[in-house]
Amino acid sequence: MIKLFQFSFIFLLTWHNAYPADYKINGKIEGISGGKIYLQEFYGDQNTIIDSVIADKTGNFSFNLGFQKAPGQLRLIFAERRFLDFVFTKETISFSTSLEHLLEDITITESVENQVYYQYLKFRAKSQKRIDELRKQLYTFDSTSVFSRELNAEYSHIVRQEEEYVQLILTNHPDLLATAFIRIDREPNPDLSWNKERANRWVFDHYPDHFMFSDTALLRSNAISAKIISYLSVALSIHNHPDSLENIFSEASFRLLASTGNDSVLFNFMRGYLSNGFITLGYKSLSAFLSEIPYPCCPCETLGQIRNSGKNQSGRMPPYIFLENQNGKKIKLSLRNNPERIFLAIADCRWSDLIFEKLMKQNKTPTGDGIETIYILKKSEKIPVQLSHFTFYFISEKEISKIYKITGRNQRPQLIITDAEGEVTGTFNSWLEMIQMKLL
């Protein structure tokens, strides 16, 4: 009996030690004596209250998170919907602050993630306060005045200082989840001397520079949905007519989808979020269009293994390639002496058509502002009816194989960019990839 007891005790002790200790949030908020505190978690655009406690007379409280809680963002809600957000990555979080000055007085005594995160939040709050003050003052002065120039110089200095500070955090803590939240939190700051129209367009174009949706843990936060709403609000600021708004929303949506990179979970969330949102806003056609986007969107065709595939593959195009025009006449097309964009399209491919349409618009820019694109289909394919009024060439299997060997990519659709000497400077198979590189 004693041996059985000893065995059972050893077994229980071993079983207990095989699992990590529970993680906790230990907090103290002075001024919240006896107040109720709620713990909220997120997933995508959803939020759920998962626990609640009552602080003691000194403001102390504790939440038990268990040891299986997935990394993400957790929010404490208290005192008439005031809140504090924390980054959770399998570590206990301990902090203290006051109800009167939540951010200013907060001290993180346990959790490296949140020490870095709140260091950033405090710095940002301080610099943003001064930036807002400068913006208000600058709008009241003539932009040519000496005082206005001094304010603009201070504004530029603070923005530059903030960027340098953030870059230091990103360099020193590249692997923290807090770093991902800090990247997403960044927004472009336009020159205050610009007029409203120019500033809004610049912000819209540069907002995606801060889209870093590469970690699925971000879905367990409100960061992605908040960023989507913020970017669509920027889109609203640049449209000139109600009829143009759907086009702006479409452009913004493609950039948001591109920000998910090659992660199917993030891509599917983004697509669903946008599609559902545009139904609510009354843009049913845009919603339907987005909802039908497949993943992966490209490539639509893969033909065996050709050398080393990848965007960084470099090579020089041959002096010329043999093609056929739409009348079946064989031509010898030079690929050197001029920078070119060669687009190997696919008939009846949604995203090949999308890339084609975007490139056609770029070709219509004033002389000198764009590079002419050569549109090529395989010899066995027919030009889609909706594109029949554009000029296409046809290529044989033999000639297309030569190109694949040079670019290192054996896939279509494929956009190939060359310089004046015929050197390949970029190859792209995916419209997402092209949007990321600001080619569309």
Image: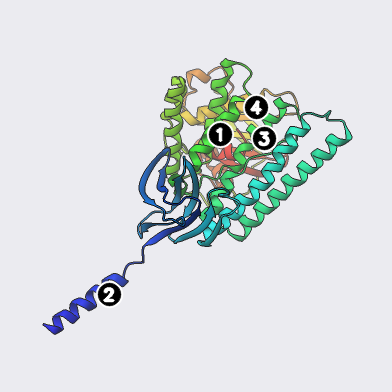
Q: Nearer the viewer, mark 3 or mark 1?
A: 1
* Residue at numbered disc 2: 14
- Residue at the right extreme of this rendering: 146
Q: How many marks?
A: 4
Tell me the distance, in whole angstroms, between the alpha carbons under discs 3 and 2. Answer: 68 Å
Tell me the distance, in whole angstroms, between the alpha carbons under discs 2 and 4. Answer: 67 Å
In the displayed structure, 192 sits above or below 248; it is: below
Q: Secondary structure at mark 4?
A: helix
Q: Nearer the viewer, mark 1 or mark 4?
A: 1
Mark 1 near mark 4, Cβ–Cβ under 8 Å?
A: no
Task: Tell me, yes or no, if residue 380 can be seen here.
Answer: no
Mark 3 near mark 1, Cβ–Cβ under 8 Å?
A: no
Instruction: Identify the image's colour scheme: rainbow, by chain, secondary structure or one colour.
Output: rainbow
Q: Residue at x 53, y 18 (%)?
A: 388
Q: Earlier in the sequence, mark 2 or mark 4?
A: 2
- Whole-percent x, y for residue 7 in the image: 18, 80
